[in-house]
Amino acid sequence: FKICFYFSFTGCVTCLDYDEHYILTFPNGYGRQLKGYKYIYVYNRRSILTVPWIELGGECSINCSKTGYNASIVFHTKPFYGGKKHRITAEIFSPNDKKPFCSVEGEWNGVMYAKYTTGENAVFIDTKKMPTIKKKVRKLEDQDDFESRCLWKDVTYNLKIRDIDAATAAKH
């Protein structure tokens, strides 16, 4: 059993120090085995109890119009048999180049490794060692009616107090 969320929107990340804007698309989200636990029967007739998980899958991109640099990213879903969860591969391109100068692979929630065309191999990023940075958001009273936090405030409040009916009603 799985549920899929197709994300067909783009985002913009601004690097203020360099006045660069990065336009990015997002991978799809998949909820695997969300009906609770599921038994998978293997060759020796024993069952393995698997735990539900959320995974990302599909292609996305990051583009900077100022510099011309861009990246193509693939979030790989776990195959039914074998394989790993949370795999990612990416290629990073210089402006106007058809071949990537860097290829990246690993786990999006773990360690990713870079291979450069120069032959150099290095850790690209280790997400487990990155510090958590608290989000900065404007106060609700400073947000427009259709900004995310303002729009979903009643749903969020009712979910926090575990009133599912009120949360559902607040969505309409």
Image: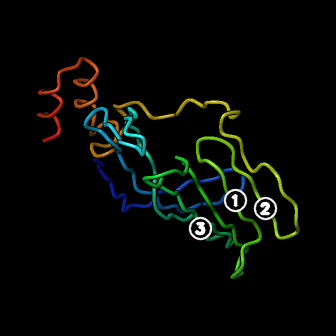
Q: Residue furthest front?
A: 44
Q: Mark 2 points at which residue?
A: 115
Residue 132 place in picture, x, y as percent: 61, 30
Residue 91's quadrant in the figure? bottom right
Q: Is residue 126 above or below residue 139?
A: below
Where is residue 72 drawn, in percent x and y?
59, 67
Who is closer to the viewer here, 84 or 169? 84
Badge 2 marks a residue whose secondary structure is strand
Counting residues from the start of the chain, the first of labels 2 and 3 encountered is 3
Determine whether the residue tagged by mark 1 lies in a helix, strand or loop. Answer: strand
Q: Which colour scheme is used?
A: rainbow
Residue 103 on image: x %, y %? 71, 64
Q: Dot 2: within a 10 Å radius of its alpha carbon, few (fewer than 14), some, or many (20 or more) residues?
A: some
Q: Mark 2 to mark 3: distance in Å? A: 15 Å
Q: Are marks 1 and 2 in contact (CB under 8 Å)?
A: yes
Q: Which amino acid does label 2 sit on?
A: Lys
Residue for badge 1:
104
Quarter of the view holding residue 153: top left
Position of residue 28 in the picture relative to residue 150 (left or right): right
Which residue was labeled with disc 3?
72
Task: Out of 171 and 165, give the one closest to the viewer.
Answer: 165
| Residue at 72% from the left image edge and 79% from the top image edge | 99
Q: How far apart are marks 3 and 1 (CA)?
A: 10 Å
- Mark found first going from the N terminus, 1 or 2: 1
The quarter in which the C terminus is drawn is top left
Q: Which residue is drawn at 35% across and 31% down?
A: 140
**Mark 3 residue crowding within 10 angstroms, few (<14) / some (14–19) / many (20+):** some
